[in-house]
Image: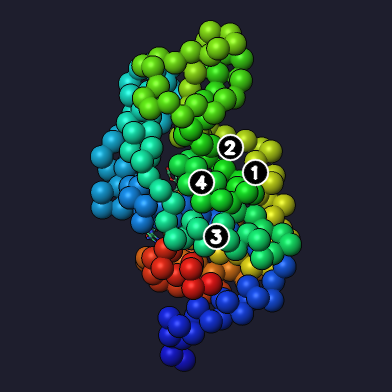
Amino acid sequence: MAEPSHEAKIQLLKKKLAEAERVVVLTGAGISAESGVPTFRGQDGLWRQYRATELATPEAFADDPRLVWEFYNWRREVLAPVHPNPGHLALAAMEKRFPQFTLITQNIDGLHQTAGSGKVVELHGNIWWVRCNGCGELAEDRRVPLPELPTCGSCGALLRPHVVWFGEMLDPMILDQAHRALETSQVMMVIGTSGVVQPAASMGATAKRRGAFVAEINLEPTPYTGIYDLSILGKSGEVLPLL
Ligand code: OAD
């Protein structure tokens, strides 16, 4: 059977969304690409320019916190002037259409919230928040750059970015929120993620097992494309406003 046209796929997803009450979305770096934020694994990907294992790990921070903060201050500089794109804005508008709508993101850029999304489950944290290495206190801090070695206002210990590093566990409460949405959703959209970092990578498969209609929106196929119901190839900033 011939593959349905791009337009037919969009119409099918629109129909599934129109019939649904419970929707879950998973986003990755691809949704922010059209805002000018580099993805991790693309040609100019962040993890190609930097040796991530030397910077985004608890060991690196213990060895050389100044260097790790230099990296995060650079990432803050890149992100500070960036605006949400039509993909972020479409998802923020979509949230209002459904009784239950959960937006799970792997991104730490905070662009979904800037676009107006209210219910965002941030699996990997948020670069605009800092966490005390001593007392664990969390605070939003949008200074760019932060002092070379920022310290906690309460206990004086070193602050770290409130992001999940390689080798660290995800917050179980955040994961639980994500899983509750995945278990009950009727439609899931997996947008702009390469599907290679767990546990996010298998979330589409979980929703599919629970009976959801799962659609992927990506520039290219991913390791999971074959198990989803629909693969829409294209830019999220162009596809999402059509939905
Ligand atoms: P990747 O850089 O691995 O993948 C980005 C995906 O977005 C690729 O599949 C691209 O094809 C797709 N893409 C690029 N531009 C797009 C566009 N305009 N519209 C739609 N799709 C587009 O980023 P993630 O999958 O998000 O984790 O990476 C997952 C995690 O790996 C990140 O959260 C980060 C990283 O290590 C941590 O830092 C903990």
The furthest residue to the bottom: 1
Residue type pointed to by label 1: Leu
In this figure, which residue is indicated by the disc labeled 3?
91
In this figure, which residue is indicated by the disc labeled 2?
170
Name the residue nearer the viewer: 54 or 234. 234
Rounded to the nearest angstrom, the CA distance separating label 1 from label 2 is 7 Å
Asked if residue 77 is positioned above or below residue 11 in the image, the reply reads above
Label ID, residue 114: 4
Q: Tag 2: Cα neighbours inside 10 Å, few (<14), some, or many (≥20)?
A: some
Q: Is mark 1 within 8 Å of ligand 1?
A: no
| Residue 52 seen | no
Rounded to the nearest angstrom, the CA distance separating label 2 from label 3 is 24 Å
- Label 4 or label 1, whichever comes before in sequence order: 4
Rounded to the nearest angstrom, the CA distance separating label 3 from label 1 is 21 Å
Name the residue nearer the viewer: 155 or 52. 155
| Residue 35 left/right relative to 205 | left
Residue type pointed to by label 2: Leu
- Label 1 or label 2, whichever comes before in sequence order: 2
| Residue 147 seen | yes
In this figure, which residue is indicated by the disc labeled 1?
175
- Which x, y percent locates residue 180? 72, 52
